[in-house]
Image: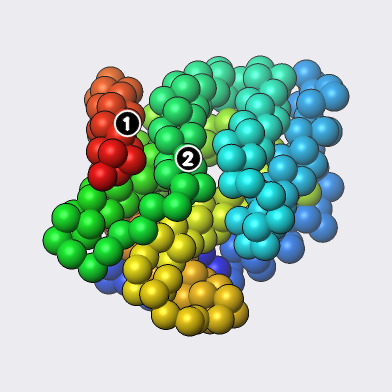
């Protein structure tokens, strides 16, 4: 539903009706019943990478939903997904996939430290009170987290899959050779990652807000609020995707580097405060 909401809000913002919210599920179900067509250079990773990415995405989703372990496992599991996607794109040997893989590695190098900083703050016992200073720090922290999640999901302004230009794509360029059930597994893995990161952002606000912690709210209603928050984040991302454009690629590492320094100092101030 998160991916479908993004597409629906983007269509509404551009004056179109758009596809149904569950259209991604329908397309995936149609693709998973088709036999994949492999190129002449396909090998082990062509067969194994879609399943590895799907299983890693499923574990990330279960971790974000049911919290059976530490959230610090999320960057590791996302790294496994990214390795599977990179191995698939490089093994098939197309030039567009190679350029997309190079851009994906750059995003990974800059996103991983920021994600770890965010998760360290999430695992702490910080509580944002209902005063101006706490709301300001919380808003700035949410802004930095949103930037890294947009980069992690290859959304504008970091990537724009709507351009249909493989020279500038990141995620879509690596899947040009994928078809059938393998394309469906990659798509499911991406949707698992999207919903997991949105749910993580929502739970960050729920678990560190004084409004929820100072009241005896049952865990069930906290989960309901987190799910509604994840859907609200999907609406916001869809609006951003409809009203923003992809920036020049040389601008992206500078922005993510500044975001890392900003989040580092903000985390230090939050810890000292």
Image quarter (top left, top right, bottom left or bottom right) of the N terminus: bottom right
| Residue at point 42%, 71% (across, down) | 213
Choose between 187 and 262: the one closer to the eye: 262
Q: Secondary structure at mark 2?
A: helix
Q: Position of residue 8 (x, y in %)?
A: 42, 69
Choose between 238 and 183: the one closer to the eye: 238
Q: Position of residue 72 (x, y in %)?
A: 59, 40
Rendered view: 254 above or below 58: above
Q: Which residue is mark 2?
A: 120
Residue 228 visible in the shown view: no
Rendered view: 97 above or below 272: above
Is residue 169 toward the left or the right of residue 29 in the image? left
Q: Position of residue 165 (x, y in %)?
A: 41, 34
Which of the 4 quarters of the picture holds residue 81?
top right
Q: Position of residue 12 (x, y in %)?
A: 32, 71
Q: Which residue is mark 1?
A: 264
Is residue 216 toward the left or the right of residue 76 in the image? left
Image quarter (top left, top right, bottom left or bottom right) of the C terminus: top left
| Residue at point 27%, 54% (across, down) | 138
Rendered view: 37 above or below 195: above
| Labelled pair 1, 2 in contact (Cβ < 8 Å) | no
Q: How is the image coloured?
A: rainbow
| Residue at point 82%, 33% (across, down) | 48
Circle 1 Cα neighbour tier, 10 Å, few/some/many (<14 / 14–19 / ≥20)? some
Among numbered discs 1 and 2, the one appearing first in the sequence:
2
**How far separated are the C-alphas under marks 1 and 2?**
11 Å
Q: Secondary structure at mark 1?
A: helix
């Amino acid at each position: 539903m998160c991916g479908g909401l993004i597409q629906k809000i983007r269509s509404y913002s551009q004056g179109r009706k758009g596809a149904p919210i569950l259209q991604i599920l329908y397309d995936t179900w149609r693709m998973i019943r088709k036999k994949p067509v492999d190129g002449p250079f396909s090998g082990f990773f062509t067969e194994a990478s879609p399943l590895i990415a799907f299983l890693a995405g499923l574990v990330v989703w279960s971790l974000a939903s049911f919290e059976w372990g530490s959230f610090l496992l999320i960057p590791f599991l996302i790294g496994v997904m990214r390795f599977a996607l990179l191995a698939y794109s490089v093994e098939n040997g197309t030039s567009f996939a190679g350029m997309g893989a190079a851009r994906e590695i750059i995003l990974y190098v800059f996103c991983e430290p920021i994600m770890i900083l965010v998760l360290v703050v999430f695992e702490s016992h910080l509580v944002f009170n209902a005063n101006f200073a706490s709301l300001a720090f919380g808003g700035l922290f949410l802004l930095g987290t949103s930037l890294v999640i947009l980069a992690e999901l290859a959304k504008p302004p970091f990537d724009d899959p709507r351009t249909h230009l493989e020279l500038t794509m990141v995620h879509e360029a690596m899947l040009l050779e994928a078809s059938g059930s393998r394309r469906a597994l990659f798509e499911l893995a991406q949707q698992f990652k999207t919903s997991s990161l949105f749910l993580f952002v929502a739970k960050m606000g729920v678990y560190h807000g004084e409004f929820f912690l100072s009241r005896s709210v049952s865990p069930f209603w906290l989960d309901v609020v987190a799910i509604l928050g994840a859907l609200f984040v999907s609406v916001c991302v869809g609006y951003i995707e409809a009203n923003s454009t992809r920036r020049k690629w040389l601008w992206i590492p500078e922005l993510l580097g500044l975001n890392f320094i900003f989040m580092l100092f903000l985390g230090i101030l939050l810890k000292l405060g």
